[in-house]
Image (cartoon, rainbow, N blue to C red):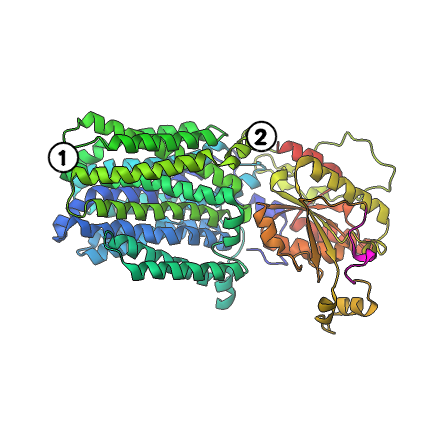
Amino acid sequence: MPSAGDTRTPERISEAGAPRGNPFGARFVAPLYLGASLNPVNSSIIATALVAIAGALHIPVGDTAILISSLYLTSALAQPAAGRLAEEFGPRRIFVAGITLVLVAGIVGSLAHSLTALIVARVLIGAGTSAGYPAAMLLIRRRAEQAGHAAPPREVLGGLSITGAATVAVGPAIGGLLIGGAGWRAAFWINIPVAAVALFLALAGIARDPDPVRFGSPRTLASRIDLLGMLGFGGSLTALMIFLDALPRLDWPALAAALVLAAALAGWELRAAQPFLDVRLLVANGALTRTYLRNGLTLMGTYVILYGLTQWLEVARGLSAYQAGLMLMPMGVLTALAARVVSRRAAVRWPLIACAVLLLVGATATLFVGSGTPIAAVICVTAVFGLTSGAGTVANQTVLYQEAPAAALGTASGLLRTFGYIGSIASAAITGTAFHRGVSDSGLHSIAWVLVAISALVLVMTVLDRQLARADRHHTDQPPAGARNPGPAPSTEPTRAEPTRTELPRTESRSADMTTGTHTTPALDPARTALLLMDFQPVVLGAVPDPQGVLARAGEALDWARAHGAHVVFVRVALTDKDAAAVPAHNKTFSQAVAAGYLTDGTAATAVHESLKAEEDDLTVRKTRISAFASDTDLRAELRARNVDTLVLAGLSTSGVVLTTLRQAADEDYRLFLLADATADPDPEVHRVLMEKVFPHQAEIISTADLAALSTAAQ
């Protein structure tokens, strides 16, 4: 994470590891796909080994369920944790560390002679493989931004989904082949060669993280990654797993512990400066929360069939592990095909509805499967779930990428997998409960009835989700993902008879195009952008040169925001009597303001200038210090609630609110655009130095005339 005084230019950061050809070529994506596949393949390959492991260790088959739930529990916590760590320390570092841990886990599992040792291996596998997906999502977004793309090509994100979705379904077939020929230990030692290849490809094909590692003090590090939030999240999930694993016996103490820890976690996260689990975002961003729930429920249904049907085929139908895995091959093929088809579509609502309908069809068909059902009919039922898995995984990932804040994409991506693993833990509990007295047709039908209920709920959630339709209308009008953003086109609007606009340091304010060496400004998505108009108040305007000119250009920016649907935030500085009393004497700026009484709230001098009219949906923030974030309104939470990841800044003065707000927003990883001609300072030389020497390292320096072209490029 760059420090506040980081003097590297955007060009230097962008050029690190810049490819000479296609930025998303095989050398870059191959290790990402392979690394992201390690978790789902380990989730599914174990399914065909459970019966063999139970026989080798002389334990009941039901006891081996811990090998499923232990990996899922570890992954449920480790996925968002790995995402947060990747945001803090660099995605490549976390990606490589995770693969290395998988190598160690493969060795431990291969040498294990007890259930305890196998559990340790599965926990290590869960922790190591969890780094793959969230780190890959961050690396893909970083590469897209460095290449000047508005978004990565759809086939890149689709490939990530296809790899994960296909390996879930193909895993049992691969596992059946390996275990049938080499024994159950193959489910563990297979990680050694695969992880070794992934590690080699990652070191060779992924550029080093540009920022040096800065751990800071243990207390600072714990606060940055929200260590207490992670521990609380892990504790509540552990208690929930214990409750689910005990079913059909009701373990009330475990359930109570899960609820108490969850409540404590929510309370802590509401107060945390950098929450691991952003409760406010989950409450405010309904589209993102519904995506998590929909993904978790869909994967619950898929995994119930994956594990339940595999055990039923081996016990009730007498098939070998290899034969059971082979029967699931069509499921894997159709998973990949469905994922590929959906990944080429910009729209997500109808694929998600189709996914829910197919889940319901498959659940209903399972009600009629029994010991006398022809094998071909059983294969057809599994194929339906393959279509469901492929379509649902890709579409939900697309919604996540659209709705998650860019600054928290790693954690958000990990949480998507976390909800999937919670569903998987629940699926293991459902399977264990249904087969508690033995694997039978009646147990399979009990599973099917649960599936019917799950699929009906997913269908209702999807059909009633209006945000999916709105998102489709917005994104289908945009150019294909991966299209290069043109630089801002020259303005064709007539110039106003006003003072000359500020000359901009354009060569320093553009991101480097990695394939051509030219400079482009990333396009603006107004729906995810907030215009911050800061301190445009009579008490401040009188101190800057050309107040009418800068005010007029702030009005132009406001008109742009209104016309394009960007969010508008008015920031003003004003002190109530209580605020004034709290200002210490050593605060030179505000103690003098208090003494003079010119920042008193409720006066005309501290109101937003009358030419900048607020509307009902606008946010007005009253601040009591220089930064816009030092306000009586939780500006961070408000921006998260509006799903804002990009800020356009304009204000008075350049060395005051603009400097402090821009630096703080940069540290919080917002994409930043600064309107140089809608910003002014009492000292023109200070304004020039900041615009030319300081701000280009954190923000794109543009003019109000650039806004129309930038937003048009994103549409």
Q: Nearer the viewer, mark 1 or mark 2?
A: 1
In the image, residue 623 lies at what x, y percent? 70, 59
Q: What percent of the width, then of the height, locates residue 691?
A: 74, 50
- Dot label at residue 595: none
Mark 2, other Cα within 10 Å: few <14 / some 14–19 / many ≥20: some
Q: Residue under label 1, please give it.
A: 317
Residue shown at the point (60%, 51%) measured from the top left: 638
User: What residue is shown with label 2?
Assistant: 478
Identify the image quadrant of residue 121: bottom left
Numbered range of the magenta stretch: 600-610
Residue 586 falls left or right of residue 204? right
Q: Earlier in the sequence, mark 1 or mark 2?
A: 1
Report whether 70 appears left or right of 36: left
Is 144 drawn above or below residue 244 in the view shown?
A: above
Instruction: Tell me which corner region of the image, top left, top right, bottom left or bottom right, holds residue 563.
Output: top right
Q: Residue at x 52, y 37 (%)?
A: 467
Label 1 crowd (10 A; few <14 / some 14-19 / many >=20): some
Give whichever of 595, 455 is nearer the camera: 455
Residue at 47 percent across and 35 percent down: it is: 464
